[in-house]
Image: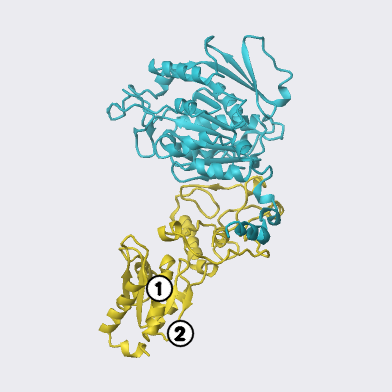
Chain colours: A cyan, B yellow
Amino acid sequence: MSYINKPKVAHPSLPRNELGLTRRQYEGSMSTLCAGCGHDSITAAVVEACWGLSMKPEQLVKLSGIGCSSKTTAYFVSGSHGFNSVHGRMPSIASGANAANRGLTYIGVSGDGDSLSIGIGQLVHVIRRNVNMLYLIENNGVYGLTKGQFSASADIGTKAKRGDVNSTPPIDPVLLALSLGATFVARSFSGDKAQLVPLIQAGLRHNGFALIDVLSPCVTFNDHEGSTKSYTFTRENYHAVTETDFVAPAEVISVDYAAGESIPVSLHDGSRVNLRKLDPDYDPTDRSAAYHYIETKLKQNEYVTGLIHIDESSTTEFHNLNRTAKVPLNSIPFEKLSPGRAALDKLMGRYR
Amino acid sequence: MAVQAFDIAERLQTPVFVLSDLDIGMNDWMCPDLEWDDTYRPDRGKVLSAEELAGLDKFYRYVDRDDDAIPYRTLPGVSPKGAYFTRGSGHNQYGVYTEDSSEYQVVLDRLKRKFSNAPRYLPRPAVMGKGNNEVGIVSFGSCDGAIREALDILGKQKIDVDYLRVKAFPFNHEVEAFLKAHATLFVVEQNRDAQLKSLLTLETAVEKSKLFSILSYSGFPMSAQPIVDGIREKLAELPRLSIVTR
């Protein structure tokens, strides 16, 4: 266990958000992950992001599959419903819940094993369906719970703790999402909270599927020399291509940047993402260009981070395409949901 | 059946599997008009509203408040007081992670009681025949048509056979009573391994020696003749034949 359970007492001087809640009220139960696990830093970033957005805890739904990463949904926002699905099947649960109630905010937490091996079929279809949710991949390149075997995101040449060298090509979740037409694709590092928090906030507010691949070193099985997902390697080969500021709707008018410095992207709820390009040749709104850029950098062993691609003009968002009910299905009276006997008789009449 | 399956799933808070097979699913069937009862209202089971939650000191997801082994649940988005985490690891009845054996067993024992009580919510078996309590058929699913035809043929040959079609698992007590009442039982099913017969011997106190399998697994839908032949052959070996035939 990485730390002892903190008492749920808030100091009166703790800052409060618009709802009058402190950060402590966005925490969850005690983490049982290894001390120093990157995943705990991501949990802290999620807490910060939700607090900053003044999100009502009961308006958030936390979903996950199986794995170290998937355990973390218990460690943030204890006032939200959470669900550990079957391994790799979180997208199905998220899609179903989302279809039944579009008014809630959905956050899915998964890992490289859960998303890129057993659950890859589900991942590609939740991207394709553009389900309105934030999907975090806590990517450490190994199966931590089963003691450190290579996962599908392990790079060629990376060394396991026992010394085995991986020779199987990896699946890169960012390239995968770009190739499938995802409208919000980002990559970050668990050790860079300043970058991660606005990305999470923007992902939660994006109207459609938002993927953030977060490199999250496994301190127990993948943090040694020769690993390409260790803290040291990640810090040395980390290349931020954009800097992201999330600007809430109320602040949009007051915050501005000089022309040429930033690309402001308006989100559907009135909030805004300000992207500052660190590489002048990079265009995050051009999917093909983004793909080419990421692929080139990967070949040079560089992890490109930041908001890699965003498309707020897409009309393929799940609810938009499927014309789902605006109110939660559970609040629609049954009389309105069931067309009744007369409609059934009419339907059967067509087959006589 | 689908409507009922949803009601059972919500009442028992557990997945319900509706079994079908290739014959039911892919062949054309004559069937009566589908009916809908306009007075039907779904059973959402034990769901607490925001008002009910407000009246509670604290909500615990897995506490058996009504002593029926079914705890209350809540819907997302209703109240932060109703939040709970459906975890993949061991938890106690308060929904909290635990590695304490006794706390964990309380939850497993409640689930055991829930499944033992489940048949009261499930469809009862369909029973046909004169109730002579000598020879019976137990079956399920798409064997039904072939069995009814076989019963007809056997009836014309003055052999009366009762028939119970299982409609749900865990078995209703009527299944056990039917097995107990009949001296000779034919378990008709379309699989190589006699899966229904295995379940009957596992889940009931039936004597294995009075169960005989009639199996069909040729890849074609079952027909009546193998059932008629199977029953006639076995009954010929048994001294009881004279009692059954009229």
Output the chain of dot 1.
B
Mark found first going from the N terminus, 1 or 2: 2
Indicate left or right for B103 with B211 as reference: right
From the image, tell me which residue sits under label 2: B130
Q: Amino acid at mark 2?
A: Lys
Secondary structure beneath disc 2? loop
Q: Residue at x 54, y 51 (%)?
A: B95
Q: Position of residue B129 (x, y in %)?
A: 45, 81
Q: Position of residue B51 (x, y in %)?
A: 72, 53
Q: Position of residue B5 (x, y in %)?
A: 54, 60
Q: Amino acid at mark 1?
A: Ile
Q: In the figure, residue A169 lies in which quadrant?
A: top left
Output the chain of dot 2.
B
Q: Position of residue A324 (x, y in %)?
A: 64, 42
Q: Are marks 1 and 2 on the same chain?
A: yes
Screen quadrant of the C terminus of chain A = bottom right
From the image, tell me which residue sits under label 1: B147
Cα distance, mark 1 to mark 2?
15 Å
Q: Nearer the viewer, mark 1 or mark 2?
A: 1
State whether residue B232 appears in this view: yes
Q: Residues within 10 Å of mark 1 (few under 14, many from 20)?
A: many
Q: Name the residue furthest front.
A: A352
- Give the vertical position of B202 relative to A116 (above or below): below
- Give the vertical position of A255 relative to A221 (above or below): above
Indicate left or right for A54 with A95 as reference: right
Q: Residue at x 51, y 33 (%)?
A: A127
State whether residue B160 appears in this view: no
In depth, the one of B199 and A200 nearer the eye is B199
In depth, the one of A209 and B95 nearer the eye is A209
Secondary structure beneath disc 1? helix
The mark tally for this picture is 2
